[in-house]
Image (cartoon, rainbow, N blue to C red):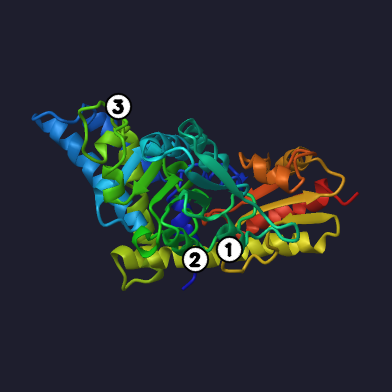
């Protein structure tokens, strides 16, 4: 079935100003339904939960319904496994503090050089417990991490592995199943950053050997908010991050209570994706509709990625940072590149003449950019597509690159 772009674009705010927005890995456009839900909450239910009066009961019901919608989105069977956080970074900071009492001197944590800093820096708090950090790096001849290099880092003192599901620079999807099996065999826990993955592929936390997962809703068509998921038994074992007398999950991990209106806005994401899935596969519903939606998204975005990568492959001055095949199943539409002789910032500014918005820099994956030797000249240009982008918009970008950023 043809991808229903008209339906998709009509669902989003901010797409009618003439610009092509290709900075989606930094933040997608928000659903109109999310804005409507946020405003409706503030107008009709804006009180504290926990009261016996009707509006407080309605506020509590709203939070429960929207938490359940998030659980559906990621395949969690228990809505109380979903913790609302201000962002992915703050979610991992909270998790690291909550896990800290379980660590002792000599324990080891495996981090990577190819993650966003949100899944590296927060774990440094464990150094206070005498934890040793070991880094999974990239081999010199490739930009694809090797599982055998992870094997060499795992040992009897490994307590935790923190890894990204997909690089926000390379666009490379990691073999999370194989990673999780290795981590489980080592007797350790696995914390996954799914920020770059969540807008593009279906998440089913119960289908994978993972323990914790976090992602950002403002990069997944919703408000500026994050979600942290963990298996209930593990969440119950965490040190409370709220008042000492609050012990139930998820409340003990949501200090000050979650942002109720943002939770209301977030709850609109899942119904939208289910509606998209039903347009692509009318006989589906629920999880099947979500599967259909993300299958359609993957095909559409793969075409867009290949359209740009084909252009970059034709330019002798272009260096593609990541896989060069946009249709590869483990390649997300997050495309980073350099053009010889051009500062990355100058490239990003030049294409704005065609009302095309891209970004440049290290995108808080500084360790990876430095490891690849790309920290100079403004880092990399990053073009990141969402499923509401079009082939015409990509053509505008490639035309602008030809006109305003010619080979030197």
Circle on res. 178? 2
- Describe residue 262's horizontal placement relative to residue 7 as left or right: left
- Quarter assignment of residue 222: top left
**How many other residues sit within 10 Å of disc 1, few (<14), some (14-19) or many (≥20)?**
some
Residue for badge 1: 147
**How many other residues sit within 10 Å of disc 3, few (<14), some (14-19) or many (≥20)?**
few
Residue drawn at x 42%, y 50% is 11
Q: Tell which tag, 3 or 2, sits nearer the viewer.
A: 2
User: Distance of mark 2 from mark 1, alpha carbons?
Assistant: 8 Å
Judge whether 149 appears above or below 215 on screen: below
Residue drawn at x 49%, y 35% is 130
Classify mark 1: helix, strand or loop. Answer: helix
Residue for badge 3: 256
N-term-proximal mark, 2 vs 1: 1
Q: Nearer the viewer, residue 32 or 96?
A: 96
Residue 255's spot in the image, x, y percent? Answer: 31, 29
Classify mark 3: helix, strand or loop. Answer: loop
- Describe residue 372's horizontal placement relative to residue 66 as left or right: right
- Describe residue 216's horizontal placement relative to residue 332 as left or right: left
Judge whether 326 appears above or below 344 on screen: below
Q: Nearer the viewer, residue 90 or 240?
A: 240
- Residue 173: tell me if it is visible: no
Residue drawn at x 48%, y 58% is 6
Residue 194's spot in the image, x, y percent? Answer: 47, 51
N-term-proximal mark, 3 vs 2: 2
Do the CB atoms of the residues marked 3 and 2 lie less than 8 Å apart? no
N-term-proximal mark, 3 vs 1: 1
- Quarter assignment of residue 117: top right
Classify mark 2: helix, strand or loop. Answer: helix
- Residue 335: tell me if it is visible: yes
Do the CB atoms of the residues marked 2 and 1 lie less than 8 Å apart? yes
- Quarter assignment of residue 26: top right
């Amino acid at each position: 079935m043809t991808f229903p772009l008209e339906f998709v674009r009509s669902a989003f705010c901010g797409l009618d100003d003439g610009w092509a927005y290709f900075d989606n890995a930094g933040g997608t456009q928000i659903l109109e339904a999310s804005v409507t839900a946020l405003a409706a909450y503030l107008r009709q239910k804006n009180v504290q939960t926990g009261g016996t009066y009707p509006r407080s009961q309605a506020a509590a019901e709203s939070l429960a319904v929207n938490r359940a919608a998030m659980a559906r989105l990621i395949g969690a069977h228990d809505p109380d496994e979903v913790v609302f956080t201000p962002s992915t970074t703050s979610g991992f900071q909270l998790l690291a503090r909550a896990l800290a009492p379980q660590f002792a001197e000599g324990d080891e944590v495996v981090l990577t050089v190819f993650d966003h800093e949100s899944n590296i820096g927060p774990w440094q708090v464990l150094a206070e417990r005498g934890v040793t950090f070991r880094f999974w790096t990239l081999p010199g001849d490739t930009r694809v991490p090797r599982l055998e290099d992870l094997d060499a880092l795992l040992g009897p003192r490994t307590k935790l592995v923190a890894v990204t599901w997909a690089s926000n620079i390379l666009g490379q999807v990691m073999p999370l199943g194989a990673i999780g099996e290795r981590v489980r065999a080592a007797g350790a826990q696995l914390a996954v950053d799914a920020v770059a993955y969540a807008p593009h592929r279906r998440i089913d936390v119960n289908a994978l050997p993972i323990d914790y997962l976090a992602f950002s809703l403002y990069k997944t068509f919703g408000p500026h908010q994050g979600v942290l998921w963990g298996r209930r038994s593990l969440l119950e074992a965490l040190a409370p991050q709220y008042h000492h007398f609050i012990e139930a999950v998820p409340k003990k991990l949501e200090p000050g209570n979650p942002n109720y209106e943002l939770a209301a806005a977030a709850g609109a994401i899942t119904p939208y994706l289910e509606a998209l899935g039903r347009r692509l596969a009318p006989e589906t519903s629920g999880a099947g509709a979500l599967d259909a939606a993300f299958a359609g998204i993957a095909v559409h975005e793969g075409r867009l990625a290949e359209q740009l990568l084909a252009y970059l492959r034709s330019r002798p001055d272009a260096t593609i940072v990541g896989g060069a095949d946009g249709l590869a199943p483990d390649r997300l539409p997050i495309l980073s590149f350099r053009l010889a002789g051009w500062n990355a910032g100058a490239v990003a500014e030049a294409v704005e003449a065609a009302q095309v918005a891209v970004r440049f820099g290290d995108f808080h994956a500084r360790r990876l950019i430095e490891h690849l030797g790309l920290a100079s000249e403004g880092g990399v240009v990053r073009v990141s597509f969402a499923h509401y982008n079009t082939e015409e918009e990509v053509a505008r970008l490639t035309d602008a690159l030809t006109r305003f950023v010619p080979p030197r």
